[in-house]
Amino acid sequence: MKLLFPLLVAAGLWSVGAMAQTASRPPSAAANPPNMAGSAGVRTHLEALHYKNVRDLRRGPDGQWVGKATQGNVEKSVTITPQGGVIAR
């Protein structure tokens, strides 16, 4: 019985320490939107996603970018959200 109490206290302190470590982690890179300052940033973002021949980029009033790009030798119309999501049709 005398050994059980210190063991339970140690286990409780260990779990609190583990929670503190989890809470202090910086946010993951996926939570941060990519840097898309201007059409050059949007072009770089699309090229990082393996789009080629990016052209005709223009920004709409809602903050989304639209343009044309090629992926796998197929030309697509692309829409890029302010958060970095890509919709290709």
Image: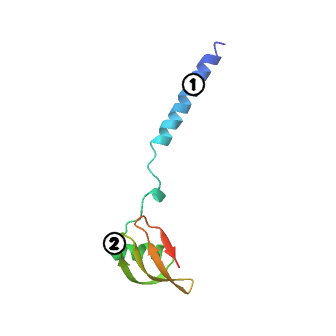
Crowding at mark 2 (Cα within 10 Å: few <14, some 14-19, many 20+): few
Q: Amino acid at mark 2?
A: Pro
Q: Quadrant of residue 42?
A: bottom left
- Amino acid type, label 1: Ala
At 46% from the left and 56% from the top, the residue drawn is: 31
Percent of width and height locating residue 36: 37, 69
- Of the numbered discs in the image, which one, if any, rests on residue 31? none
Q: Which numbered disc covers residue 10? A: 1
Q: Secondary structure at mark 2?
A: loop
Q: Nearer the viewer, residue 60 or 83?
A: 60
Asked which quadrant contains residue 80, the reply is: bottom left
Counting every numbered tag in the picture gives: 2
Q: What element does badge 1 sit on?
A: helix
Question: Percent x, y for residue 27?
Answer: 45, 51
State which quadrant residue 32 falls in: bottom left
Q: Nearer the viewer, residue 36 or 83?
A: 83
Q: CA distance from mark 1 to mark 2?
A: 57 Å
Single out the residue that lies furthest toward the front: 61
- Seen in the picture, residue 15 relative to 58 is either above or below; the reply is above
Q: Which circle's residue, 1 or 2, is located before the other in the chain?
A: 1
Q: Is residue 71 above or below residue 6?
A: below
> The N terminus appears in which quarter of the rendering?
top right
72 lies left or right of 69: right
Residue 37 screen position, x and y as percent: 33, 69
Look at the picture and state if 54 lies above or below 15: below
Residue 87 in picture, x, y percent from top left: 50, 73
* Point 39% across, 74% down: residue: 65
Q: Taking 51 as reference, is 62 above or below it? A: above
Residue labelled with disc 2:
61
Q: Residues within 10 Å of mark 1 (few under 14, many from 20)?
A: few
Query: In this figure, which colouring scheme has been used for the structure?
Result: rainbow
Q: Nearer the viewer, mark 1 or mark 2?
A: 2
